[in-house]
Amino acid sequence: QLVSTDQPPLKKQRTVSDLNQVDQLKQLTTVVADTGDVNAIKKFSPQDATTNPSLIYKAAVMPEYASIVDDAVAYGKGDLSLTMDKLAVAFGTEISKIVPGYVSTEVDARLSFDTEGTINKARDLIKMYDEVGVSKDRILIKIAATWEGVQAAKQLEKEGITCNLTLIFSIAQAIACAEVGCTLISPFVGRIMDWHKKAKGVDGFAPAEDPGVMSVTAIYNYYKKYGYNTIVMGASFRNKEEILELAGCDKLTISPALLQELTNASSNVQQKLDASKAVNMDIPKIDMTESTFRWMMNQDAMATEK
C-alpha cells in the first residue's frame, strides 16, 4: 500500500515587508484619525480620533450626515454656539461607537485666553456627552495651549476631565502642559514647517531637518527624559515623510488622505523616536513659570505668530 508523503502547504508568515506602512506604523505608534468623517474612520480602524471645527464642517456638508446636522439645529433652538457644540458632540458620539479609545472635541477657540470660560465650556461639552450616554473617560477636551488654556486644563484634570492641549508650537507650551498633568498634547508639525518655508524662502526640508519634526522630537525626548506621563501626539502633517520621521512617538493623528498614502506604500518603516534612548540624553530641565512661559514664547517668532 502506497502512503502519500505530500504535506499540506505551510502558511506563509507575514513579515514587516509584507505590511503596508500604516500597519507597520501601528507596531511603533498609536495611530489616530484626524477627521470628522465617520466612514473614513471606519476604513482605517484607528485607536482614537481627533476633530476640530473645520473638520466637523467638512463632514457636516456631506449628504450622509444631514440628519446629524438637523438634530443639532433643532437642539440649539436658534443659539448658534449651542448648535455648534451639539454638532461637535453628535459627531463625537458617532465616532465613539467606532474607535475604542479617545475622541477629541474642541472648545470654542474664542475662549483661548479665558480660563473660566474654557472650564465652563468643557463642563458643558462633557454634560452633553453624558446626556447621550458617552462617558467622560472616552473624551479629550481639546484646548488651545495658551497660558490661560493650560490653567483651565489644570483644573479640569483635577475634576477627572481629560484634556488634549493643542496648537503647540513651542517646547515652553509642552512643558507647561506636562507640569499641570495634561493627559495629552498635540504639537503641530506642518504649520511649523509652513512658517519656516516662508521665512527662509525654500520649497521644503528633508524629513529629518523639518523644523516641525525637530520640534516634536525635542518635546518627546524632554518628556521621556524627565518621566512625564503626558502623551505626545504629533499633529498637522503636510506629507507622509513627516509622519514616518516620527515613528515611535506616543501617538500620531493623521488625515484620511495621508493614511491612504501610507496604506498604498509598503517600504520599511523604521523607529525614529525611542524613550529608552531619551532617558540618557543631555537635556537641561526648565522650571516653567508664567513669566518663563511668556518670555520663551516672546523669543520665538514662529510660536508667537502661529
Image (cartoon, rainbow, N blue to C red):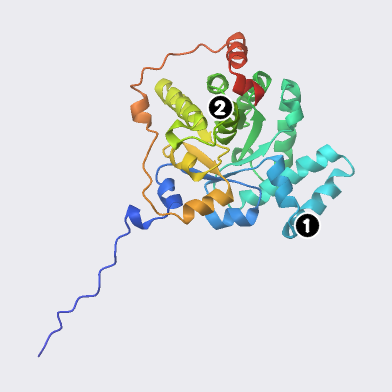
- Circle 1 packing at 10 Å, graded few (<14), some (14-19), many (20+), is few
Relative depth, front residue between 197 and 156: 197
Judge from the rendering whether residue 80 lies leftward or rightward of residue 256; answer left or right. right
* Residue 153 falls in image quadrant: top right
Residue 248 image point, x, y percent = 41, 38
Q: In which quarter of the image is the N terminus?
A: bottom left
Q: Which amino acid does label 1 sit on?
A: Ser
- Circle 2 packing at 10 Å, graded few (<14), some (14-19), many (20+), is few
- Local SS, label 2: helix
Residue 229 makes an appearance in the image: no
Give me the residue at 47% from left, 42% from top.
Answer: 241
Give me the residue at 33% from left, 21% from top.
Answer: 280
Residue 199 makes an appearance in the image: yes
Q: In this view, does 206 lie above or below 5?
A: above
Q: Quadrant of the C terminus?
A: top right
Residue tagged 2: 200
Residue tagged 1: 67
Residue 166 image point, x, y percent = 61, 31
Single out the mark in the foreground, 1 or 2. 2
Relative depth, front residue between 264 and 104: 264
* Residue 159 falls in image quadrant: top right
Q: What residue type is labelled 2?
A: Lys
Judge from the rendering whether residue 119 lies leftward or rightward of residue 211; answer left or right. right
Mark 1 vs mark 2, CA separation in Å: 47 Å
Residue at the right extreme?
A: 78
Q: Is residue 286 above or below residue 30?
A: above
Give me the residue at 68% from left, 45% from top.
Answer: 55
- Local SS, label 1: helix
